[in-house]
Structure formats: C-alpha cells, structure tokens
C-alpha cells in the first residue's frame, strides 16, 4: 500500500514537473515575442523619426532657398530704385569721341567706328557706378570686345559718375576701331546693366 502511494506521488510529481517545464517554455517564448515586437516598434519609431528629420531638413532647405531668392529680388529692386534709365539712343564717334553720327540719327555700317550710348536717367544716388553693356549682333550672338577682367556674358563695361536727380544725361562710349568699321548692317540690340539689373533694352538699326 505504501509502495503504491509512493508511485502515485512520483507520477504526479513527474507530471507536475513536465507541466512546469512546459509553462516555463511558454513564458520564455512569450517574452521573446514581446521583445521582438517592442524592438520592431522601436526600429519603426527610429525610421519614422529619421523620415520626420529628413522632411524638416528638406523644408528648411526649401525655405532657405526661397529666402535667398527673395533677398536677391529685393536687392535687385533696390538697384532699380537707385538708377532708372528713361531713354537710350545710339550714336557714332571717332577715336577722340567726336560725333560722326549724333544719337538718334541714321547709322551706316561703313561709317561706324565707336558706338556711343546716350542715356537719360533718374537717380537716388551720387557716386561712381560701373555700367555693363551687352551688344547683340543681328543674328543674336553677343558681340565681344577685347576688354580684360570683364564678367562673362557682357560686351564691355564703363565706369562713370552718376548724379542724383531727375532727367540727367550721360554718354557711355563703346569699343570699336579707328580705321574701319567692325559693325555690320542689321538690327542690333543694346542692354545696359547695373548691379545685376538690366536698366534698359533698345534696338538700333545699322544700315
């Protein structure tokens, strides 16, 4: 009788031991699943935060570019307020800047020596100013002088004293040759620039 009782106890112990081991195994599996789930959520949060940071940086760069563009436009508008050219006419001079053809009169290719540009302007400043000139030939190509230290995209530059006030006049003398003409016939385009701003565009016919 005592032996049977011992056998029953041992059998129940073994079953309990097996059940406890299985329960421990289930708990371990559960902890592993929870760890993996939380780890994935953490990774997803990191990825999400990285994308949010990327979006913020992208928005900042975009706003910064817009700010720089607006600042550039503002500075250009200030330049336009500094000087405003109200009229532009083209004449022709000799080497000593004597008029061969006064501004507004007909220009002929054979007589052309040094083009000169007479402007009427209004100004809120009074100082030396560098004007940059673009001359486009009849076929649209930019005419180039031999002037050194000239920014690309311009034909030549000249520095003059600009007076404050309204309806001031100024003659801007160009490049050429004293012995013969280097300007062919056709419709030329003249642009006068100051501080990255085109102040005036005019077309002139050379016959």
Image (spheres, rainbow, N blue to C red):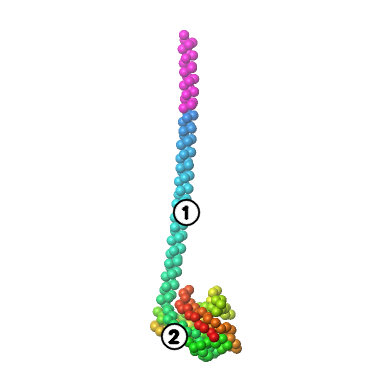
Depth check: 48 or 144 in front?
Answer: 144
- In which quarter of the view is residue 113 placed? bottom right
The single residue placed furthest to the right in the displayed view is 179
Q: Is residue 51 above or below residue 174?
A: above
Is 7 a magenta residue?
A: yes
Q: Nearer the viewer, residue 192 or 71?
A: 192
- The residue at the point 42 percent across, 73 percent down is 77
- Of the numbered discs 1 and 2, the one sitting upstream in the chain is 1
Vertical arrangement, residue 42 with respect to residue 85, above or below: above
Q: Residue furthest top?
A: 1
Q: Is residue 126 visible?
A: no
Which label number is shown at residue 54?
1
Task: Determine crowd level at label 2: few under 14, some 14-19, many 20+ residues with C-alpha closer than 10 A.
Answer: some
Front-most of residues 109 and 144: 109
Disc 2: which residue: 169
- In the image, residue 159 lies at what x, y percent? 49, 81
Query: Residue 187 location in percent, x, y?
Result: 53, 81
* Highlighted magenta segment, given as a residue range: 1-23
In the rendering, at what x and y percent does residue 7 appear? 49, 14
Secondary structure beneath dot 1 equals helix
Residue 48 in view, yes or no: yes
Q: Is residue 27 magenta?
A: no
Query: Separation of disc 1 and disc 2 at Cα?
Result: 55 Å
The local crowd at label 1, few if under 14, some if 14 to 19, many if 20 or more residues have their Cα within 10 Å, is few
Identify the residue at image location x=56%, y=77%. 139
Q: Is residue 184 left or right of residue 8?
A: right
Q: In percent of the image, x 54 and y 82: which residue is there?
A: 186
Does 185 sit left or right of 26 as displayed? right
Placement of 79 over or under 180, stated as above or below = above
């Amino acid at each position: 009788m005592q032996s049977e009782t011992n056998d029953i106890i041992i059998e129940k112990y073994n079953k309990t031991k097996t059940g406890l081991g299985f329960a421990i195994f289930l708990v371990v599996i559960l902890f592993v699943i929870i760890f993996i789930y939380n780890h994935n959520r953490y990774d997803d949060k990191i990825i999400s935060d990285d994308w949010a940071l990327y979006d913020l940086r992208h928005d900042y760069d975009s706003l910064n570019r817009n700010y720089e563009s607006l600042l550039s436009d503002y500075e250009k508008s200030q330049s336009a307020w500094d000087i405003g050219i109200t009229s532009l006419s083209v004449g022709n001079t000799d080497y000593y800047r004597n008029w061969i053809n006064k501004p507004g009169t007909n220009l002929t290719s054979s007589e052309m020596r040094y083009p000169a540009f007479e402007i009427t302007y209004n100004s809120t400043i009074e100082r030396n100013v560098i004007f940059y000139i673009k001359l486009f030939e009849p076929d649209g190509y930019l005419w180039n002088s031999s002037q050194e230290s000239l920014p690309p995209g311009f034909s030549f530059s000249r520095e003059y004293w600009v007076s404050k006030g309204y309806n001031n006049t100024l003659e801007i003398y160009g490049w050429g040759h004293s012995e013969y003409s280097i300007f062919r016939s056709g419709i030329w385009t003249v642009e006068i620039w100051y501080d990255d701003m085109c102040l005036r565009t005019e077309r002139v016919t050379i016959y």
